[in-house]
Every structure is written in C-alpha cells, then in structure tokens.
Amino acid sequence: MTSQQKWIAFITIVRREIHRFLRIWPQTLLPPVITIVLYFVIFGTLIGSRIGEMSGLPYIQFVAPGLIMMSVITNSYSNVVSSFFGSKFQRNIEELLVSPTPSWIILLGYVVGGMCRGLGVGLIVTVLSLYFADFSLHSAPITIGIVLLTSLMFSLAGLINAVFARNFDDISIIPTFVLTPLTYLGGVFYSIDLLGDFWGTVSLINPVLYMVNAFRYGIAGISDINIIWAFAMVGLFSLTLFLVALNLLEKGARLRS
Amino acid sequence: MQPALAISQLSKTYDGNFQALKGISLTVKQGDFFALLGPNGAGKSTTIGIICSLVLKTSGTVSIFGCDIDTDFSQAKQYVGVVPQEFNFNQFEKPIDILVNQAGYFGIPREIAVERAEKYLRQLGLWEKSHAPSRALSGGMKRRLMIARALIHEPKLLVLDEPTAGVDIELRRSMWDFLRQINAQGTTIILTTHYLEEAESLCRNVAIIDHGQIVKNTSIKELLQQLNKELFVLDIREEITATPEIAGYPITLVDGHTLEVEVEKSQSINQLFAVLSERGIHVLSMRNKTNRLEELFIKMVEKNLSGASHD
C-alpha cells in the first residue's frame, strides 16, 4: 500500500467511526451529557455549596475539571470497546482483516474514532459546565495536551478490552469493576490530601489521578501531583497500551483463528 | 505465466490438535474457474480462510499471482476478493456505505469508490436498496451484496465460499450468469459448493478435498470420464406390468410407465432402444437420474474414508 492508500484507509475508518456514534447519538452523546449535568446539579450546586472550598477553590470549580475528564475517559473507552467488539460480533471486522490495511492503521483508525467521541463529549460537557461554574484557562497547552493523551490512552484500553472480549458481558466488566472505581478514586471529587499518607500514596498508582490533576492544573492552576510527572506517567501508560494493542492486532489475537 | 494461486504443503492445526489441513498442494491457473469440493469439515473453508488471511496457517506456503501471503501480504491481498459463507457485514450500515468503506480499506479514493459501488450494485440488482439498512435485505440480496463488496477493489482472484447456499433456483442461475461474465472478463474464480451441479455447470477444473487432503485434482471433463455407469430413467408410452429383461442392462420397473436402466459407458443406448422397440416398448423420453458428479464425489469421499480408517 502506498502512503496515500494508507491515508485513505485511515480516513475511511475514522469517518465510519464518527458516523457510527453520530447515527446513534441518543445512545452515545445524550446519556453522558445528562449524567454530567446531574453531577453538576447535585455535587456542584446542591451539595457543593455546603462543602465550601477544596484546595482553595469553590467546590464546583474544583469538581468541574474532574467531571469533564470523567466524560472524556468513559466516552473514549466505551466508543472503541463497543465499536470494535460489535465488529467482531457481527464479523464485519473481517472486512478490514482481508484488506491490505496494516494493523497500525486499523489501530489508529479506531483510536482516533474513540478520541473524537471522547473529545466531542468533553467539549459539550465543558460548554455546559460554564453554566454552573466560572473558570478561566490557566494553561491551554497543558489542558489540550492532557485531554488528548487521556482520550488516546482510554481508546487504546478500550480496544484491548474488545480484542479479548468473547461476549457482551466482557465489555462491561472492565468499565464497571475497573474504570468506574479508578475514576471515582482518581481525585475527581476530592483532593488526595484528604486521604492521609497511606491512602494518598496508594492513590498514586491510579493513572486517572494524574490525568485529572494535570487537567485541573491546566484549567485552575492547582494540582496534587507534579505536572511533568503526570504527563510522563500518562505518556508511558499510553505508549505501553499502544504497543500491546498493536501486538495483539499483528498477531490476530482472538481475530484470526 | 504465474499461477493465480499456488499452495504448497499447506497445513493447519487448530487449538485442541484438530488437523484441518494435512499438507495440501494446489495450483490454480490464471483465468480458471475452479471448484473446491468436499464434505462438511473437509478443510475447504480453512483453505479459503488462509488464502484471504482470516486463518493463520501452521506451515506451508501460499502465493497469489506470485506474491507470497507472508512476505508480500499487502500486494497479495490486493489481488483477492472473498465472499464468505456467512454474512459478515454490519447489518446496520447501508449497502452503499458497506461498499464505499470496503473500497477505502483498499486505498481506493472515495469518488472512484462511489462510482464503482453504483456499478456493482446495479449489476447485481441491488441499486434500489443501496440506501436501505442492509439488515432489511433478503437472504439472496445479502449474498449479492457480499459479491459486490468482494469485487469493489476489482480483484484478479475471486474466492467464493458456497455463494449460492440457501438461494432460490432463479437467483442461483442469475448469479451463475454473473460469475461466468466476471470470469470471461479475466477474473480467476475459485468456488466451494455443496451443489455439484453448480461445479459441473460453471467450473473447468476441480479439486476434491476430504479430511484435510486433496483426494483428486483434475479437470471436470476428466473427472466425469471416470464414471463408467449412468442410471437413465425412461418414460414409456404403453403401460407394462412386468420388468423387461435385457442381457447386460439391469432394469428396474418403477411404475407402469417408468423404467430405470443402468448403462455402462461401453454399452450402446441405441441397442437398448432397439431391443425395447422390438418388444413393443416405446420410449417417450429419457433423463439422467443421478447427478453424475455427485455420484463420483461420493465414491471418492467413501474411498478416502475407508483408506483413512485403515490408518
């Protein structure tokens, strides 16, 4: 395949992925928006006003970056896991497997599709959050950089989950038992200073903590974690997941018999 | 001239140690219309799966128009179009999108892909359904959609795994005509089928595969010449009650107006008619009772089975 042909194949996969989640927008775009609005109303406005400040910020301003990041994480992940597993289930993944499209283009196509949904929902949630909270942008490069890396990382994780999944239960186990606890314990709703030394140290193995804090730093200028360290950790996780996912596709794991 | 397909010592062992292919070798020349026959579980779909890289081989080599599927996989895949046995497209997408996307995976620019998609959807009688959800298509339409999808990148080798399974007779005939037309335009076709009439009608060469081994690889013509007996059904004008006895021609009386006669290749049908006529039995019409290829196929598979049981 020439470079131009590879580009066409890549764009085709991305376009198909975007078309897929836009076609079923009541399942893909609407629910996360409703959920996040409820979070803002309950944790931000109703309970948040009684909590007062967290790390020197009004609680709603503290929680808003975490909620935006949570929507990016869950949507990036769920787009790739459901689309890729759906293709396996209906066997239309074979359309790609019989084509000369290299594995890394297939991987990038699905991942960019997942990132588009994650970032799209994140953008909608950001716009909605402006209704509930006032916040300025402390650092655009850090904000954009960490949100791109986060959606990349969870899109990759979603693809790996989909490769291993044998049934629909398998694609809900990771989001329910891994992703949700990591997100809730990743400093979205609280500062890890509240946890004390032991649990604060344990929290450092949670990659979501680095993402949420780096994103909060980009918006509000505060973080529990060193930003360079946060970027390094998320970058390392993303690279590892990319190599694992690529290896799985190259080998045809659970795809070719 | 490079063969369209060259398979050498191809073997495949699945998890659980089931050996689906036991070192088969096969060559299909360019422009051929080739049948791969065999009972269920013989290894046909595994062979096709390896050719189009959906199945990973255990050992052996496969080259398509001289391109090895291991070392030159990108070019080898450009040459192959595959129509699988089961529906494997996204049931929620429209036929036009399925075709245009498939073209994209082969690096074909969108404007060319759209033109080609229209061309093949029209040729296969699907244009009116091009924007309908593909899950709403009938079984026959879905099969034709998969043929159109396999042709969208204009492959030199088209591989069809039981393309007319479950398709009604009229549609099957129209699909045969379409495949003949594609073959006449230069596309090499490899077909697996359970309908031996289909292989006899369409294909020039054949390989019979059973228990992961090629038990016969020859031309359809030569294969049929190996048959030395045929069973004819004769419709006779006047009713008879007793079975006529003619030396050398085993006859069965089916009913008062129908006889079945076994005729060896070396025997004369004229002589049979002459004797029947002398006895006042007038034949109105005659037809071949069994599918000849089917008969031969069963013999070969049975022979292979008895050979395997001695291993």
Image (tube, coloured by chain):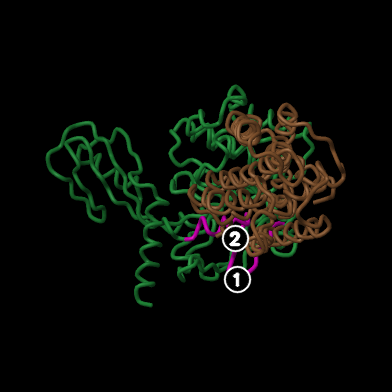
Chain colours: A brown, B green
**Which residue is depicted at the point 72% across and 31% down?**
A129
* Boundaries of the magenta span: B43-65
Q: Do tags 1 and 2 sit on the same chain?
A: no
Seen from this angle, which residue lies furthest bottom? B311
Secondary structure under the numbered disc 2 in the rendered image:
loop
Q: Position of residue A133 (x, y in %)?
A: 74, 31
Answer whether residue B306 is visible to the viewer in this image: yes
Q: Residue at x 56, y 33 (%)?
A: B92
Q: Is residue A28 on the magenta stretch?
A: no
Relative to A99, does residue A205 appear above or below in the rendering? Answer: below
* Residue at x 59%, y 63% (from the top left corner): B56
Chain to which the residue tagged by mark 2 belongs: A
Q: Dot 1, how many residues are within 10 Å of its Cα: few (below 14), some (14-19), or many (20+)?
A: some
In the structure shown, which secondary structural element does the residue marked by tag 1 occupy?
strand
Q: For mark 1, what is the residue?
A: B59
Q: Nearer the viewer, mark 1 or mark 2?
A: 2
- Please say whether residue B79 is visible from this viewpoint: no
- Specify few, some or many for label 2: CA neighbours under 10 Å numbering under 14, 14-19, or 20 or more: few
* The quarter of the displayed image where residue A42 is located: top right
| On screen, residue A22 above or below A154 | above
The answer to whether residue A25 is left or right of residue B226 is right
Percent of width and height locating residue A134: 78, 31
How many badges with numbers are in the image? 2
Chain letter belonging to callout 1: B
Q: In the image, what residue type sits under mark 2? A: Ala
Kindly check if marks 1 and 2 are in contact, taking CB atoms under 8 A apart as contact: no
Disc 2: which residue: A253
Q: Amino acid at mark 1?
A: Ser
Viewer-side residue, A211 vs B208: A211
Residue nearer the viewer, A55 or A229? A55
